[in-house]
Image (cartoon, rainbow, N blue to C red):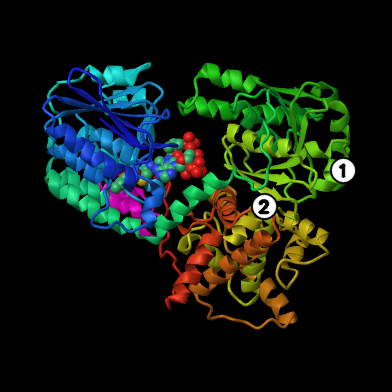
């Protein structure tokens, strides 16, 4: 029939034409592949010997959707996309069946939705994750899915970018059949069945007893559930507009509306930022110059210390199916740790995420011991004891003696020198940093710190382990604060400098959170981390304070250690937001003003919100640039990922390095307005 590198059409007998997408790694439906697909669909339409076309995918995948790389190139009149393939299918008289084995996502799933029947193997998943790229499904997904499963369910699925497992998709009637293997054979059984185009159906709202009010209700409710437009909800609102069109308009008009909204999103800075994040995340495991070696198999792990951090790390191993021994000498700490572990697994059962049996098995795969002599058979140890070099060195010397020679020894330090810790052992090549972020079982970020002696196999094992633990793992060089905390100090220092110039901490936090989109403002972050920790670290760094005045040292002197002591830069009251809500404190503002006056710092009361954002984000980008220049960070994209996953940087700004580049570009083009949001509310429904 037709043979190209990317797609094959073969006759399978009985009037069936099998079209196989074969465009590794994910059978992306790029412009080039679609240019080949359109004539294949048209040829089948004209061929009287064909009554059914079955689509399938090679490489263990149906299709990962449109090729995201294509979106940076504007389409021309000749460009063919999935929309053209689907339009050719709509014009055709043949029956179309999707045989899904693996993922059918985005445009790939939209192709399947344009088929008359859909069959999948049980391990497959289907979904429209475009929202995570700041887009909406642009090949009919917003029009067909609401017609198939109702507007309410379709909105939920698309706004979350949810990937639905085949058995669940069958229950929702997205699929017609689920088989254990050989989706193509199952799909072929639908040959010759009547056409059943979703485009000919009417959208059900999925809201009972609301009569005429149902459309405005469904749509208004959805608009209320997502972040406001400029605070990450840009794509979500357009997606809802497209679904509104599916409810109110004939298919052809809704299809046209979807296209217009999609094109608006493709060229938006928010989508460019999220596409950057998508690719940056996929670059992480590529370490230039790292020789290819097999990672060590991690069958058993150990954690030293059963504090909050150690317990969280133990849970992460247990969740990944790796049994873990926790070494802790204090009974009280063990008790607390056990409580936390069982509480967390019970929560998973209550939420329906785990069966009782699985939860019990996982919780019991964490054992507690008091003595290092129990560690003879572990493959990796993660130390999570007090952040002090002498303590860590003592622990590592003991670990070196207690574990088998091939075991990897990792430290969860957030600032200390990995090389100095490694020097306490006779196996520095087997030592690295694994810096988890608190709470370790929730936060996705893991910094993998490569010491000067860390061997290629140890680093490769760290990266493979990060994947197994389902973390977003970023490799960092061994430097003070690694990537994230090093930049955090510069960012906090800039926030303190603004406060010294007369801007209140409450205003700075409000601007960085509500207006720029950070999860928390810089002063609330400092209060959460503990001002004593900042003080300790700045003293250990040659006594340099954050900012120009010793405000943190003064607050610590007054016993204001942050949230944990009920006061820091802000006040906290157990009766307000469970003691976690920051309450502005005029006393702190006065203290800052007094120290600034004594230090002769000029005041800048008219500073604009835009300047606050510009100064704080510039401090981040400058310090990030220094980390790339000195080789601590491998790429600017790695820094962006650290800040998005570890420090609540708004993903729709793409991370501090991407944002700085965008601002510089706009300034070069003569637009000086920093790209910020003007909103105060954020609700968790979409990822974007
Ligand atoms: C869309 O469809 C728009 C339509 O609605 C409208 C059109 C008109 N494009 O993640 P992995 C690459 S928008 C280009 O490590 P996994 C990825 O960069 C699209 N490249 O594998 C990597 O490359 P490299 C909607 C893609 O097994 C390699 O494939 N679809 C694409 O862990 C392996 O990726 C989505 O949003 C792509 N679409 O996970 C799905 N997808 O090796 C996005 C992947 O050079 N993709 N690559 O670093 C995913 O969620 C995951 O990649 C997937 C596989 C689950 C498919």
Tags 1 and 2 in contact by the CB under 8 Å rule?
no
Instruction: Say if 46 sits above or below 533 in the image.
Output: above
- The residue nearer to you, when weighing 4 against 494, is 4
Residue 133 on image: x %, y %? 40, 49
Residue 503 on image: x %, y %? 58, 74
Question: Which quarter holds ligand 1?
Answer: top left
Please, what secondary structure does the residue beneath circle 1 have? loop
Residue at mark 2: 529
**Cβ of mark 2 under 8 A from ligand 1:** no
Residue 272 colored in magenta in the image: no
Q: Which residue is drawn at 75% across and 57% down?
A: 559
Indicate which label's residue lies in the foreground, 1 or 2.
1
Residue 635 on image: x %, y %? 60, 55
Q: What stretch is highlighted in magenta?
A: 218-239
Is residue 192 toward the left or the right of residue 626 in the image? left
Instruction: Say if 670 sits above or below 386 in the image.
Output: below
Q: Residue 669 lies in what quarter of the image?
A: bottom left
User: Which label belongs to residue 423?
Assistant: 1
- The residue nearer to you, when weighing 500 against 103, is 103
Q: Residue at x 29, y 17 (%)?
A: 185
Q: Can residue 207 be seen in this view?
A: no
Residue 304 on image: x %, y %? 77, 33
Q: Residue 626 lies in what quarter of the image?
A: bottom right
Find the distance from the CA under tag 1 to the CA under tag 2. Answer: 29 Å
């Amino acid at each position: 029939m037709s043979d190209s590198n990317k797609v094959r059409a073969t006759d399978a007998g009985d009037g069936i034409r099998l079209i196989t997408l074969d465009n590794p790694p994910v059978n992306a439906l790029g412009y080039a592949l679609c240019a080949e697909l359109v004539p294949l669909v048209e040829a089948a339409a004209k061929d009287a010997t064909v009554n059914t076309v079955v689509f399938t995918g090679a490489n263990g995948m149906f299709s990962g959707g449109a090729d995201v790389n294509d979106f940076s190139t504007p389409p021309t009149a000749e460009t063919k996309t999935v929309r053209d393939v689907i339009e050719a299918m709509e014009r055709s008289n043949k029956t179309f069946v999707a045989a899904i084995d693996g993922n059918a996502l985005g445009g790939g799933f939209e192709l399947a939705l344009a088929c008359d029947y859909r069959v999948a193997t049980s391990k497959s998943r289907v979904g429209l994750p475009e929202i995570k790229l700041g887009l909406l499904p642009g090949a009919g997904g917003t029009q067909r899915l609401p017609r198939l499963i109702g507007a309410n369910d379709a909105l939920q699925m698309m706004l979350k970018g949810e990937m639905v497992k085949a058995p669940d998709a069958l229950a929702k009637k997205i699929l017609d059949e689920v088989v254990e293997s050989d989706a193509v054979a199952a799909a072929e059984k639908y040959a010759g069945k009547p056409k059943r185009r979703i485009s000919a159906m009417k959208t059900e709202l999925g809201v009972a007893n609301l009569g005429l009010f149902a459309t405005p209700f469904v749509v208004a409710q959805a608009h209320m559930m997502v972040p406001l437009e400029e605070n990450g909800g840009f794509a979500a609102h357009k997606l809802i507009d497209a679904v509104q069109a599916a409810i109110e308009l004939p298919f052809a008009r809704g299809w046209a509306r979807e296209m217009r909204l999609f094109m608006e999103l493709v060229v938006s800075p928010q989508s460019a930022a999220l596409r950057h994040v998508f690719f940056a995340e996929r670059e992480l495991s590529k370490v230039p110059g790292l020789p290819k070696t097999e990672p060590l198999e991690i069958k058993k792990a150990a954690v030293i210390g059963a504090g909050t951090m150690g317990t969280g790390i133990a849970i992460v191993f247990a969740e990944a199916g790796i049994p873990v021994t926790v070494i802790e000498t204090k009974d009280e700490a063990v008790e607390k740790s056990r409580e936390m572990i069982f509480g967390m697994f019970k929560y998973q059962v209550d939420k329906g995420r785990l069966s009782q049996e699985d939860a019990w098995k996982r919780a019991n795969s964490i054992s507690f011991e008091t003595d290092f002599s129990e560690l003879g058979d572990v493959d990796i140890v993660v130390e999570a004891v007090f952040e002090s070099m002498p303590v860590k060195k003592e622990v590592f010397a003991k670990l070196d003696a207690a574990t088998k020679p091939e075991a990897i020894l990792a430290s969860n330090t957030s600032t200390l020198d990995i090389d100095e810790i490694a020097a306490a052992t006779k196996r520095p090549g087997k030592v690295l940093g694994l810096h988890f972020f608190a709470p370790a079982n929730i936060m996705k970020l893991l910094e993998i710190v490569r010491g000067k002696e860390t061997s290629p196999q140890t680093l490769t094992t760290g990266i493979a382990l990060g994947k197994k633990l389902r973390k977003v793992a970023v490799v960092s060089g061994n430097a003070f604060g690694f990537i994230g905390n090093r930049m955090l100090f510069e960012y906090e220092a800039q926030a303190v400098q603004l406060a010294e110039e007369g801007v209140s901490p409450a205003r700075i936090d409000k601007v960085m959170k509500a207006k720029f989109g950070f999860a928390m403002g810089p002063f609330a972050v400092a209060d959460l981390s503990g001002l004593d920790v900042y003080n300790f670290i700045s003293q250990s760094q040659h006594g340099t304070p954050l900012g120009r005045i010793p405000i943190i040292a003064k607050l610590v002197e007054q016993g204001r250690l942050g949230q944990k002591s009920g006061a820091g830069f802000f006040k906290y009251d157990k009766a307000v937001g469970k003691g976690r809500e920051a309450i502005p404190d005029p006393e702190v503002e006065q203290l800052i003003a007094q120290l600034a006056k004594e230090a002769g710092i000029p005041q800048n009361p008219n500073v604009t919100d835009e300047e606050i954002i510009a100064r704080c984000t510039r401090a981040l980008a400058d310090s990030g640039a220094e980390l790339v220049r000195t080789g601590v960070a491998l790429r600017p994209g790695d820094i962006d990922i650290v800040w998005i996953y570890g420090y609540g940087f708004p993903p729709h700004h793409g991370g501090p390095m991407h944002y700085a580049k965008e601002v510089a570009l706009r300034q070069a083009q003569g637009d000086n307005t920093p790209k910020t949001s003007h909103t105060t509310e954020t609700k968790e429904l979409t990822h974007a």
